[in-house]
Every structure is written in C-alpha cells, then in structure tokens.
C-alpha cells in the first residue's frame, strides 16, 4: 500500500486545528512522522503519514482528492449551499436550519469515532438511536465531508465556511417549476440596472429591467437557454433586493432632498417641556377650494383662499389665523396682532405674546420689516435689531431650514387635517394637486359655479372656518397629545390648564401704528406721491425737494390720510390728507384756489423765518430762546392711574417720546382746570 505523507500545514487543515497545535501533537507516538531535507536548504521538514490521522481527517482528504480528480471544484458546478445566502435560508427555514445544527453534532461524533469497535456496526446502532436509517446517516456523513472539502477548496480553512457544513445537512429549498437559479453574476447585473441613475430617475418598470438584463447578458456571452425567466428576475428584485434597499433607491431616483424627507432618520421632540405660548409656529396653507371675492370697485372673481396660521406647539391650538386672498407681510402683521389681542368673540380665548416664533423661509415671513434684518441673515445676534416681531414683544424668531418640513411637522399635520376634515366639506373642493397626490384631483366646473353664484363668499368661508376651529378642532381629542402622554387630550384643555408663558401685549395704538405699511418717500412741490394720490400739508413745506425725504406710514385699508415721520429722528411730522386738486378754469374767488394761495404764502413766510434765524448771531439767538422759554411753564405731577393695569412698554424710543409729550399735555390741562377751580372759589377772575 502506498503511503501518503502530508506537511504539518496540510494535516492541521484536515484536522481542523492550528499549525502550532498540530506541531505539538506530532511529538506524541500516536502520529507516524518522518523528516526530509528542504528543497532549498535550511531546517528539515516534518511530514506526517495520512494513516495516522483521525478518520475524520482521512475522509476529508479522500473527498478533497475526489474533487480535484473530477475537476469540478468551481462555483458554477458547486452544490447549492456553496452560493446560497445563509441568512436568507435561516429566516425562511428556521426549523430545518436548527435541526441541521443538531445533526451536525451527531455527524461529527460519528466521523470522530476511532475506537476498536467495528465502525459500520457503530454507525448502524447510532442511526437507530437517532431514529433514522444507517443509509441516511451515511448520506449525511458524506454530505458533511463534501461540504468540508468545499470549504477547504474555497477558503483555505474549513472553519471559514462553517455554515456550509450546516447547510449541507439541510434540505435544499424547493425551486418553482420553470425557475432558474440566479448566480452571483446575474444578481450583480440586476442590481447594476436597478440602481442605474437613468433607470432609477425615470422610474422604469420591471419589463424594461428584464429586457436590459437579457440584452446585457447576451453581450456577456451567456447562452439564451441559461437566462432566467422574467418571473425569476422580478421575484429576486421584489423579495430579496427591495426590502433592504428601497431607501437607498430613493436617494438614487429622487435625490438627496427627497431622501432626507422620506427616509432619513429623525428624532422626536418632547413638547411637554414647553410652556403654552412659549413656542409658536407660523405657516401658510392654500385651501383646495374656490371662494368668491368682491373688490372695492364691485368686480367679482373666484380665487383659492389662503390661511395664515399661528399654532402653539405645546397645545397644538391654532391661536391666530386669517383668511386672505394673497398672503404678504402686511397680512402677517395684522394676523399677529389678531393673535396677541383679546377677541370680540368671547368663545375665542386665544391671546398673548409668544416667547419664540418659528417661521419658514418664505419671503413673506422673513421680510425685513418683520424680522428687522435682511433675508440673507438667518439669525440675528444683535440685541438692538428692530422689526415687527421684536416690537410686539417676541424675544426671538427662528427659521426652519429649507426643505425641512418636519421641523414644523405639527402645523403641517394640522394642514392635512384641515384639508380632510374641513375643505372637503366645501362644495367647490377641487382636490389636492401636490406632486405625490395628483391623482386626487376632483373635477369641478368652477367657472359655471361662479357664474351661477354657487361659490361661497370669502367672508362666509372665514366665519365657517372660525366655527370649525373653535367648536370642532380645539375641542376634539388630538392624537399628538396622546402620543406625548399629555394630561389633557384636547388643544383647548391644554391651552387653558397647562403651565403658560405670559407676556402682556403692547398698547393697541402702538400696534396699530406698527401694523401700518412703512415706505420712504420724497416730498415734491405737489406733495407726496403714493397709491396714485398726492398728499400735502403745511408741516411738509420744509421737506419739499429734500434729498433725504421722509418716512411714510399708512393703513392700506384706509388711504384717506397718511402719517409722515422724520427720517433721522423718526418723530411724527404730521398726519397728512390728500392735496388740493385745482380746476384749470377755476375763478379767482374759488375757495380751493384761495386756500392754495394762502398755503403758498405760509410756505414763503416759513422760508424767510428760517433764513432770518440762520443769519442771526449767536448772542441774539440765545436771547430769543430765553424769552421764548420764560413764556412756558413745565410741571411734572404724579402719573394718573387711568392707564391699563398691565402693558408691555414698546422698545421704540420714538413711541416713548410721543407718549411723554401726550402725557405732559394731559397733565397741563388737568393743572389748568384745577387752578381755574381754585380761582373761581377765591372770586378771582371772570
């Protein structure tokens, strides 16, 4: 019999142990060894005879040689478990996999048997104890040994592919009729096509995927009869590829923005840590319906109304809102005033100045007149920044990042509820037309409905929305509050009972002034040109043709008069009405012409006085001022208690100065009346 000698490395692989462990074992008399000279000199090599190894190692050696002789040791002709996905098999067939793990232990025990008893008899008795036939056990041993040989052939060590020996003892998964197995190269080609930027972006169907797969496969040299069926390719994409890669494909097909919106992991925020009115979020929503709007000139038209809404983040209550045709900065001002002031409708309890306002990046909410800074500046670190938000008492305004709707998800969710629960009850509802819901379009003949007068007026629409907010939404259990484990379940209950941030509102007259539209204008000889009208009064004479101009504030709903302020000091110059318009054919005694001539003479007199004072020496100027000062009496009595008990003092120095002047005039009038009463009692005077 020919003896087979193996190196220590080969023997260690067959025994499934390390090189050092095998080297130590060779020192015992159990192994037959010999030494031979190294081919290139050096230390002599130690060889071990195959017959002295364990039966497991000898069986594995014979199986490995069988693979080499037959020439089938390649993956294309390998058993099914060589290319199988072990994780997928464990998930689909957990019972069979666990039974194979147990059988592996029994097979290894049989293979390792090396005692004097006849091994055939031992295997028969062992199989009987397991409740299987000896033939079945022999087949299991053969499959196990073959898997171990494949592990050595592919990985150099059978321990690297331990799972193969388990899968070899498992039943092969059933293959549907007509289905061809997909090898690794076919799966890679399918994935290449599925994630191709053009294929993913254009949202191509499975049919195109299969056509491209077959075309590229034939170019690679595959035989047509070896190509898998359409159902096999679709099954692989649907069952194996998509469950774990759909999020990645969103990035490939729709880009990073959509991936962040749909798939990127997000953290929930604990809104119960907020106080009521501590954080208010503002946004605009366009209703998916049409209403009728009538202009001041009587013209009627059909429009989609818009909602400007302010929501308290803690309670989810809509604390301020307005229904408008086109939202802009002026509408936002008026809506914010509506939010913080008490309402005439006693059923509406929402009022107060929020601490922080969260807005989006829309040009309306980030207008410089509202934030006090350019739209390019997201956050202001200057405490002196003045804008409408700061003037009404809001400590800070925050802007959500662009295309990050989830940062204000509460109000976005509210808009969805408005559409579902309110807008769909309007007869002119036309359906949602957002990108992902274009199929929700509802066909309505809006033109015919408008002509027949079937559209609701915007005023009635606003009244109906107010009723829905106060009587339905605010008093209904809110799932978001339940998820936050709030003690109270409706927005109204949370608003009325939870801890609240409170800050009084500024005086209403100050708010009305701040809500006016502010513009910089030049004073011409014919007046201030604004909204197609000319405004002029006597106080504006010194500013005619001035290079600095003046600041104008006006109510866009009432342009009969405007307020004019000095650009440098921001002090009120006058309240100015429309300038007189003369008739070219007016007679000399026309009243309008007489008033205009008198105004011209007053302007000339003012100009001469300015010249005279400018030419006056310093000493004469001071003497004239002293004479004028002696004719005035300044008295500072205690403040009266007729003012509101609690107000927030505005930051505007101009407003403070204007109020001080008004208070001094009122105090002087009170002193005059008191002095007149005393003189009357003493019998002095008339």
Image (cartoon, rainbow, N blue to C red):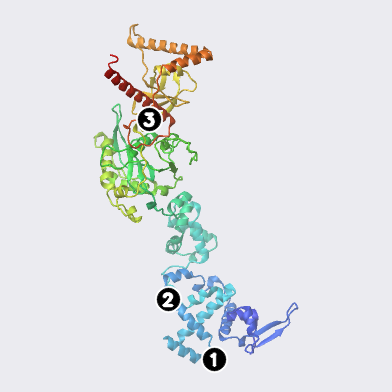
State the separation of the CA atoms marked 1 and 3.
106 Å
Tag 2 residue:
96
Question: Of tags 1 and 3, which is closer to the observer?
Answer: 3
Query: How far across and how far down the image is residue 269, in percent?
Result: 41, 53
**Above or below, comparing residue 558 to residue 460 in the picture:** above
Tag 3 residue:
513
Query: How far across and how far down the image is residue 669, in percent?
Result: 33, 22
**Above or below, comparing residue 18 to residue 231 in the picture:** below
Position of residue 42 in the picture relative to residue 677 (left or right): right
Q: Which residue is farthest top?
A: 588
Tag 1 residue:
115
Query: How far across and how far down the image is residue 548, in percent?
Result: 49, 23
Q: Are marks 1 and 2 in contact (CB under 8 Å)?
A: no
Along the viewing direction, whichever of 38 and 294 lies nearer the viewer: 294
Position of residue 115 in the picture relative to residue 25 (left or right): left
- Asked if residue 111 can be seen in this view, the reply is yes
Q: In terms of sequence position, does the residue under pointer 1 or pointer 3 come before the other?
A: 1
Q: In terms of sequence position, does the residue under pointer 2 or pointer 3 come before the other?
A: 2
Q: Are marks 1 and 3 in contact (CB under 8 Å)?
A: no
SS for tag 2?
Answer: helix
Q: In terms of sequence position, does the residue under pointer 1 or pointer 2 come before the other?
A: 2
């Amino acid at each position: 019999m020919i003896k087979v000698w193996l190196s220590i490395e080969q023997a260690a692989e067959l025994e499934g142990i390390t090189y050092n462990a095998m080297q130590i074992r060779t020192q015992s008399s159990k192994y037959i060894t010999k030494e031979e000279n190294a081919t290139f000199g050096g230390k002599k090599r130690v060889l071990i005879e195959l017959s002295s190894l364990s039966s497991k190692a000898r069986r594995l050696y014979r199986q490995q040689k069988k693979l080499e002789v037959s020439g089938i040791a390649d993956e294309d002709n390998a058993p099914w478990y060589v290319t199988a996905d072990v994780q997928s098999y464990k998930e689909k067939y957990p019972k069979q996999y666990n039974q194979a793990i147990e059988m592996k232990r029994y097979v290894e025990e049989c293979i390792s048997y090396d005692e004097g008893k006849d091994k055939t008899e031992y295997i028969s008795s062992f199989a009987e104890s397991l409740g299987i036939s000896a033939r079945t056990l022999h087949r299991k041993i053969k499959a196990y040994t073959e898997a171990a040989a494949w592990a050595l052939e592919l990985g150099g060590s059978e321990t690297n592919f331990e799972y193969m020996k388990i899968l070899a003892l498992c039943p092969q998964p059933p293959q549907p009729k007509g289905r061809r197995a997909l090898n690794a190269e076919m799966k890679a080609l399918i994935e290449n096509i599925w994630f191709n930027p053009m294929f993913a972006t254009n949202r191509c169907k499975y049919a195109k995927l299969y056509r491209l797969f077959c075309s590229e496969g034939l170019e690679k040299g595959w035989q047509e009869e070896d190509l898998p069926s359409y159902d096999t390719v679709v099954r692989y994409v649907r069952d194996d590829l998509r469950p774990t890669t759909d999020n990645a494909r969103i990035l490939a097909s729709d880009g990073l923005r959509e991936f962040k919106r749909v798939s990127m992991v997000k953290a929930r925020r604990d809104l119960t840590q907020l106080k009521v009115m501590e954080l208010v979020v503002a946004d605009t929503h366009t209703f998916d319906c049409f209403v009728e709007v009538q202009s001041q000139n009587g013209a009627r038209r059909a429009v989609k109304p818009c909602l400007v809404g302010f929501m308290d983040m803690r309670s989810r209550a809509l604390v301020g809102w307005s229904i408008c045709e086109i939202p802009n900065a002026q509408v936002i001002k008026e809506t914010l005033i509506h939010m913080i002031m008490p309402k005439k409708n006693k059923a509406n309890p929402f009022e107060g100045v929020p601490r922080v306002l969260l807005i989006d990046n829309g040009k309306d909410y980030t207008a410089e007149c509202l934030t006090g800074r350019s739209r390019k500046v997201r956050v202001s670190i200057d405490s002196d920044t003045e804008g409408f938000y700061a003037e009404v008492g809001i400590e800070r305004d925050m802007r959500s990042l662009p295309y990050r709707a989830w940062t204000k998800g509460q109000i976005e969710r509210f808009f969805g509820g408005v559409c579902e629960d309110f807008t769909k009850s309007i007869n002119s509802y036309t359906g949602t037309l957002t990108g992902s819901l274009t199929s929700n379009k509802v066909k309505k003949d809006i033109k015919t409905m408008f002509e027949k007068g079937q559209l609701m007026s915007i005023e009635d629409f606003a009244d109906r929305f107010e009723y829905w907010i106060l009587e339905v939404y605010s008093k209904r259990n809110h799932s978001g509050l339940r998820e936050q484990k709030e003690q109270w379940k409706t927005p109204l209950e949370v608003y009325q009972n939870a801890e609240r941030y409170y800050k009084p509102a500024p005086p209403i007259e100050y708010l009305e002034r701040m809500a006016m539209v502010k513009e910089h204008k030049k004073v011409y000889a014919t007046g201030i040109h604004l909204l197609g009208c000319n405004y002029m009064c006597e106080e504006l004479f010194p500013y005619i043709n001035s290079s600095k101009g003046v600041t104008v504030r006006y109510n866009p709903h009432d342009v009969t008069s405007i307020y004019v302020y000095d650009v440098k000091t921001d002090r009120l110059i006058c309240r100015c009405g429309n300038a007189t318009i003369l008739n070219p054919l007016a007679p000399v005694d026309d009243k309008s012409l007489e008033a205009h001539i008198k105004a011209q003479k007053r302007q000339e007199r003012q100009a001469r006085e300015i010249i005279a004072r400018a030419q006056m020496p310093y000493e004469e100027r001071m003497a004239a001022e002293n004479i004028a000062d002696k004719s005035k009496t300044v008295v500072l009595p205690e403040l009266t208690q007729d003012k509101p008990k609690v107000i927030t003092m505005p930051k505007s120095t101009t407003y403070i100065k204007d109020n001080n002047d008004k208070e001094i005039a009122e105090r002087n009038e009170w002193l005059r009346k008191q002095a007149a009463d005393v003189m009357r009692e003493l019998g002095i005077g008339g």
